[in-house]
Image (cartoon, coloured by chain):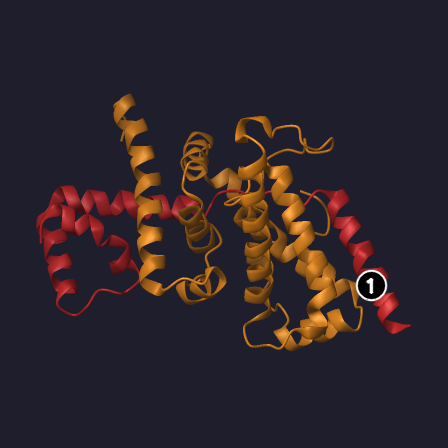
Chain colours: A red, B orange
Amino acid sequence: MNCDEFAELVTAFLDDALDSSSRPLFLDHMAVCGGCAGYYGRFTATITALGELPAPGLSPQTRSRLLTAFRETSAENSE
Amino acid sequence: MSEGVVRLGEVTDFPPDPVIVAGLRSGDEAVFALLLDEWSRGMLRLARSYVSTAASAEEVVQDTWLAVIRAVGAFEGRSSLRTWVYRILVNTARRRGERESRTIPVSSVGGERPDGDRPERAEGGPEGAALAGEVRELIEQAVGTLPSRQRAVITLRDMEGYGSDEVCEILSISPANQRVLLHRARAAVRDHLAAYYDGKGGP
């Protein structure tokens, strides 16, 4: 396995989707290639950082508009 | 942070689908509010993969919830409720994104709604503090330039933490395709960070 092939397989490795012949080759390559071990570390750090991005919520106006719509629809349905 | 917000990490006993669905059908407003607060953040992020502004994404999420309110009586439980809601969202967002690309140049969409000026992100939450502002901005920049299919997958998998099976079902794609899109998206974000640090001579 060369470095380009290694880089292409990182997501498959992380999803445990490598077949039984590729998986040991992937691990062997990482063990002997400092560059790819570093790439792997930065790749997984990127994934961690993506999971820590803050997410904005609905505006209060939209939220209360939706709660009103829910109330009105429920009232209609129960008539 | 606004009051009444339930944060993902705090929810240990989110009710199972049958309880939620029964609550929605019987008009239990607390159940609807719980869903709104639990899922809308992720829905806004996913909608943003297909439409050009945060205001437009908010309208997509609003239209999705209105559709859910109307249609929950017909929900058959063939998928999880969340997958069902997210599939409605994706269809709504795609339609709107296609309409936008036909009718208005992306650069002119800024002020399409008088009240569209709400802040792009929530500041100061525990997650926000954990990630250095500079890195956060670089990542958001990189995600913002991804093609919509890649952006949708990385949003669901890495930003929202959904499993690959659910993501395939929400987006109607194969596991292999999902993995290719995810890998390209991750590599693009990583490359964007690397280019920045290389330029600075940093780590």
Residue at position x 69%, y 60% from top? B67
The answer to whether any part of residue A55 appears in the image is no
Kind of residue at badge 1 = Thr
Crowd around label 1: few <14 · some 14–19 · many ≥20 (10 Å): some
The answer to whether any part of residue B136 appears in the image is yes
Residue at position x 55%, y 42% from top? B51
- Count the labels in the image: 1
Image quarter for residue B201?
Answer: top left
Secondary structure under badge 1? helix
**Residue sitting nearer the eye, B61 or A30:** B61
**Residue sitting nearer the eye, B24 or A53:** B24
The C terminus of chain B - image quarter: top left
Query: Does B108 sit left or right of B135 as displayed?
Result: right
Residue B112 vertical placement versus B179 (above, below): above
Tell me residue B94's x, y (percent).
Answer: 54, 50
Taking the view exactly as shown, the residue that stands out farthest to the front is B102
Query: Does B42 sit left or right of B73 as displayed?
Result: left
Tell me residue A43's x, y (percent).
Answer: 29, 45
Tell me residue B45's x, y (percent).
Answer: 54, 46
Residue B121 vertical placement versus B68 (above, below): above
The N terminus of chain B - image quarter: top right
Residue B39 vertical placement versus B28 (above, below): above
Residue A74 vertical placement versus B202 (above, below): below
Q: Chain of mark 1?
A: A
Residue at position x 61%, y 44% from top? B57
Query: Does B137 sit left or right of A13 as displayed?
Result: right
Q: Which residue is mark 1?
A: A73
